[in-house]
Amino acid sequence: MIEAAFAGFRLGLGLILAIGAQNAMVLRQGLRREHVFAVCLFCAASDAALIAAGVSGFSFASARLPWLAPALRWSGVAFLLWYGARSFWAAFRGGEALRAAEGAPPPLGRVLAMIAAVTWLNPHVYLDTVVLIGSIAAQYPGRTLAFGLGAAASSFAFFFSLGYGARLLAPVFARPRAWVVLDLFVGALMWSLAWGIAFG
C-alpha cells in the first residue's frame, strides 16, 4: 500500500510541477495574498476529484461522449486567449496589479470562477489526471485507492506550498516593474498554451 501511495505521489508531483495556467494563477494569488487558502483548496480538491474519476475508470467517458473532448478543447482555447490578453493589458498599464493588491481584493466568487475555468476547461488536466493517472493506477490491482490517494496528496502539498510560499518573493514584487514582467510572462504562457491546445 505504501509503495503504491508513494508511486502515486511521485507521479502526481511530476505532472503538476510544470508551470501552467493554474499554477500561474495560484502563484499570483499567493504573491498578492488574496484568498490564498480558498484558491489552493479549490485547485487541490479539483485535482483530487479528477484523480478519483481516473482511478475509478471514468476515463472511458470520452469514448462514449465524442463531443466532450472538442467542447473542452475550444472552450479552453477561448478562455486562455482571453486571460492572456487580460495579462498583456495589465502589463501595458504598468503596475496595475500592484495597486490592486494594495486596495480591496476582488470578490472570492470572481477569483474562484476564474481558477475554475483555468482548471476545468484545460484539456491537459483531463489527460494528466483522468487518463494518465487512471491508466497507471490500473497497474496496481488492489492498491488503486492507495495510488490515487498518493497522487491527490501531491496536489494538496504542491498547491499549498506554492500559494503560501509565494510570499517569500514579496520583496521582489514590491516593485511595479516586477509585476509588469510577471504579467507579460503569464500572458505569453496563456497564449502559448492556447496555441498548443488548438494546434498540438
Image: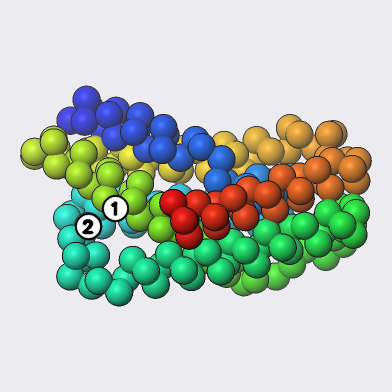
Name the element at disc 2.
helix
Q: Is residue 157 visible?
A: yes
Q: Position of residue 85 (x, y in %)?
A: 72, 63
State the image quarter where residue 19 is shown.
Answer: top right
* Outermost residue to the left: 142
Q: Position of residue 80 (x, y in %)?
A: 59, 61
Name the element at disc 1.
helix
Q: Give the class, few, some or many, for how many residues have Cα within 10 Å of label 1's Cα (few <14, many ≥20).
A: many
At a point 26% along the width and 50% down the height, the residue shown is: 131
User: Dot 2 corresponds to which residue?
Assistant: 59
Relative height, residue 130 to residue 171 (above, below): below
Compared across the picture, whether 9 is left or right of 112 comes to left
Callout 2 amino acid = Ser
Q: Is residue 115 visible?
A: no
User: Dot 1 corresponds to which residue?
Assistant: 130
Q: Position of residue 108 (x, y in %)?
A: 65, 67
Q: Earlier in the sequence, mark 1 or mark 2?
A: 2
At a point 85% along the width and 34% down the height, the residue shown is: 171
Callout 1 amino acid = Val
Front residue of this view, candidates 140 and 189:
189
Compared across the picture, whether 141 is left or right of 60 comes to left
Q: How is the image coloured?
A: rainbow
